[in-house]
Amino acid sequence: MKEFLLLTQFKAFVKERSYDKEERIRLLTFFASSLLVIILMGLHVIGSIDIELPILHFFSWLQLLVTLTTIILYLAKRISLMRAFVSYSIATQLLESLRIVCLVIACPTGYKEMVVINQIGSYTLLLYLALGFAPRATIYVTAMSLGSLLFAGFNGSEAISQQFIILFSLLSITICLLTIISQQRLHNIQQENLSYQTAQSNILRILRITQEELDAYLELCRDRKPQEKGEPKLFGLLDEQKKHNLLEAVSKLQKKYEAEQQDFALKFPTLSEAELEVCRLVAEGRPVSEIAIITGKSISNVSTVRGNIRKKLRLARETDL
């Protein structure tokens, strides 16, 4: 029960602190990497891992201080998540690079293995930055990582082999490029989603319908047996005015469909092309003003054509054309 409560509180915290999926991933990545650093630096401080050098202990204490300070500032809402993530990452890599430099200069027992471990730590930090979509910080971290890597490989002590330098250089540069490309692609996707949401909101506003009504209408269009499910759901959501407008639109569509199915030229061979066009539009239920707009004629001209149709078909004035 207690574990469930903690999980619920954590989900609520993540939801409160992140406004989209990208921010949520960045938040989780930031805390995961921070927790890993706190654990590792804590183990070094108590003497469980790493080499016992005063300068290295100082770096571990400093790293703990920087990490905890960054977390506190973020939780207190003094800095944004991106700034916290970037600041923490750059500080972490700077201290990692200084550790490697100090190890290569001091050359204590087992320093070569620790140089490799610290370089793996730098690469792990790059992976966290890639997951957190922080391209600018990735560039800085990659530059510092490559600098310490080259220093360890070419200072004369042969702390690491050339094969290791080539491998980690390629891996670091690849991760850096992938982070930049993925961030740009993610930004494009977000812009597309924003445009889609804006267009959808505008459609709903113009049509004066809700998202639920639109979903019901789309479901009605897809349903093979709309009378069983789609129709009751849609008409149950619409008010009387919307029902009237929808039925009016369906009635016009039905008349247009029926008009298109008829061959007026065959039925009324005495009518001209202009008269046949007006005849078809009348059959669709179009008023005189609308027929005038569609045909590009004046209302009086359309009325004259309607009169000519009546005469040719020998229809009385009171008969519905």
Image: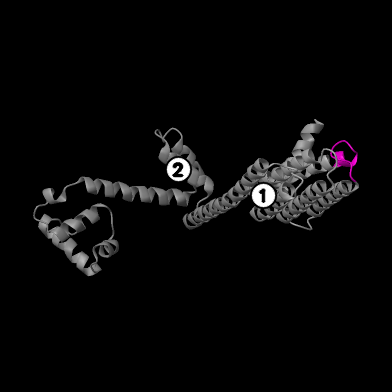
The magenta stretch is 42-53
Q: Which circle marks residue 63 in the picture?
A: none
Residue 226 location, x and y as percent? Answer: 41, 36
Q: Is residue 46 magenta?
A: yes
Disc 2 versus disc 1: distance between alpha carbons?
A: 32 Å
Identify which residue is drawn at 78% across, 40% down.
112
Local crowd size for mark 2, using a 10 Å CA cut-off: few (<14), some (14–19), many (≥20): few
Q: Amino acid at mark 2?
A: Leu
Please indicate, yes or no, whether residue 235 appears anywhere in the rendered image: no
Circles 2 and 1 in contact, beta carbons < 8 Å: no
Please indicate, yes or no, whether residue 294 appears anywhere in the rendered image: yes
Q: Secondary structure at mark 2?
A: helix
Left or right of 123: which side holds 287? left
Left or right of 104: which side holds 55? right
In this figure, which residue is indicated by the disc labeled 2? Answer: 218
In this figure, which residue is indicated by the disc labeled 1? Answer: 23
Residue 177 location, x and y as percent? Answer: 59, 50
Q: Which corner quadrant holds the C terminus?
A: bottom left
Q: Is residue 222 above or below residue 249?
A: above
**Which is closer to the viewer, label 2 or label 1?**
1
The kind of secondary structure the magenta stretch mainly shows is: loop
Most extreme residue toward the front is 156
Identify which residue is drawn at 25% across, 67% down.
299
Q: Amino acid at mark 1?
A: Glu
Q: Which corner quadrant holds the N terminus?
A: top right
Q: Is residue 143 magenta?
A: no
Nearer to us in this view, 125 or 270: 125
Nearer to us in this view, 169 or 84: 169
Residue 157 location, x and y as percent? Answer: 77, 45
